[in-house]
Image (spheres, grey):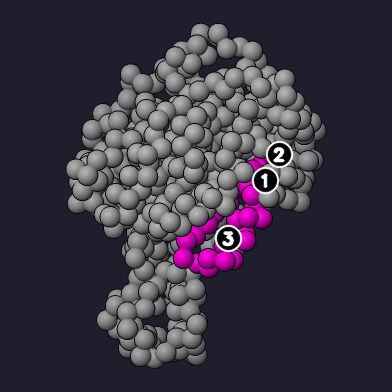
Amino acid sequence: MTQASLGQSIVQKEIQAQNNGVSANVTHTQPLWLLAEVTYRCPLHCAFCYNPTDYDKHTQNELTTEQWIQALRDARRLGALQLGISGGEPLLRDDIEDIVIEAKKLGYYSNLITSGVGLTEKRIQAFKDGGLDHIQLSMHDITEEINNFITNTKTFELKKKVAAMIKNHGYPMVLNVVIHRYNIGHMRQILEMAEALGADYIELANTQYYGWSLVNRSQLMPTKEQIDEAERITNEFREKQGSKMKIFFVVPDYFSDRPKKCMNGWGEVFMIVTANGDVLPCHSARVLPNIEFPNVKDKGLDWVWNDSPAFNKYRGDSWMKEPCRSCAEKEKDLAGCRCQAFMLTGDAEGADPVCSLSPNHHVITQAIEDSRNPVIASKPIIFRNDKNSKAIIAGELNDRVKDFHALP
Amino acid sequence: MSVQQTDIYAIALHHRFQWEEAQNCYVILFPEGMVKLNGGAGEVLNLVDGKRTVADIVAELKAKFSDVLDLESDIVGMLELAIEKAWLRQIN
């Protein structure tokens, strides 16, 4: 799965714009966006994947078609509107067609988030007939070399074919490109490629460091200068080509002074149902200590969203500590990302260390320094695959995770 | 972009306009995003159907909300915003 809806996603920006910056009232939260991570199995092995590094535990206990359909119905009743069907690679399941039909029937605006591997003429036709609204395709680079390297697979030619297939079926072309050290120097060419493919939307998602990308942080992180240059090129391109292709540039939080308003607030608008049925308020919430996340096999989504201790834990601001609690800007970012705070500092209620006001901000400056340290940065990339997941679970790659307060 | 009385608009491609019971408002859905429309904006876009002209829409809403002053400029303003946001496409 790509990093499309992490942090400052587009849906959040729209919602924020609508609320005129007034934070949603705790009692009026609604899971407007439902992300169905239907499987953690994936034919790609991307170094920047945000999926949990111990995903191998969850490849054998996936929800059934009936359980997914029930979850879709329950979430819709709670007000869910945007449905993302993601993974892993969702197309590894053969019931996506059934899920799409149900989503249409229920009135969702549905989005298949895919690497393109497994998308055939037959399947895309079935999705079109079933009422799937759009397909978001991950692209990695303009060069075959970098695409194949970073995904650890030979998928470059296939992606171009799939892009054409999406276009031919009258779908809007929505591309997601995760940006990292290996492709950030190709920003102009990536934008030109998107334009040539007829993209309607392109999201340039600077890598955020969760899951596999956290393990590979020193290997993936570009420099501040590279990011500034990438943003400059993006703005220049945007000006030149007008509004034909919407370009979203997701700013990387490590290089910001203030944290992102992660997920637009805990339990505010997002709900994720994972492959095994765990329900989470954000992608990596399972790293947090002392929270039991409900599972759709045991609990209805109404209870999960409204009443579960997990979803209420970080709503509002009464849980905040200093310096956030009395900070004039707390409504803007709600103290940032809980997972990042815990993973990097060991304190789940503390300020996101990305914030320059955080007493732990040095962990971020250190990470940036490490990524420029040739000895550290030249350690091998740990690609996202079953073998490495098993090794991480078994504690064999301890050297790469020991600095974090939970397994990424 | 200035809206003319004879213009006819429809909801843009890849966008969906629908009533949402759970939110008690109209919404526009599109790839990667959604917008909740406030009451007035929803009423205007609900009449944008690829058949009615702007003049038709104004006349219908004037009949429905006869007590509202300066309704026409509100409606045109809303349409201009929707065009600028690319929620609408012009048919004629």
- For marks 3 and 1, give the CA distance: 15 Å
Camera-nearest residue between A174 and A334: A174
Looking at marks 3 and 1 on the same chain, the residue that comes earlier in the sequence is marked by 1
> What is the chain identity of the residue bearing mark 3?
A
Q: Is residue A22 magenta?
A: no
Residue segment shown in magenta: A230-256
Camera-nearest residue between A15 and B70: A15
Q: Which residue is mark 2?
A: A223
Q: Residue at x 44, y 14 (%)?
A: A387
Can residue A392 be seen at all in this image of the molecule?
yes
> What is the chain identity of the residue bearing mark 1?
A
Q: Which residue is mark 3?
A: A237
- For marks 2 and 3, give the CA distance: 21 Å
Residue A237 in picture, x, y percent from top left: 58, 60
Answer with the quarter of the image where residue A86 lies. top left
Q: Does residue A41 appear to the left or right of A95 in the view shown?
A: right
Secondary structure of residue under mark 1: helix
Above or below, B44 against A262 in this view is: below
Type of the residue with mark 1: Ile
Q: Is residue A236 magenta?
A: yes
| Badge 3 and badge 1 in a common chain | yes
Q: Residues within 10 Å of mark 2 (few under 14, many from 20)?
A: some
Camera-nearest residue between A79 and A138: A138
Q: Quadrant of the C terminus of chain A?
A: top right
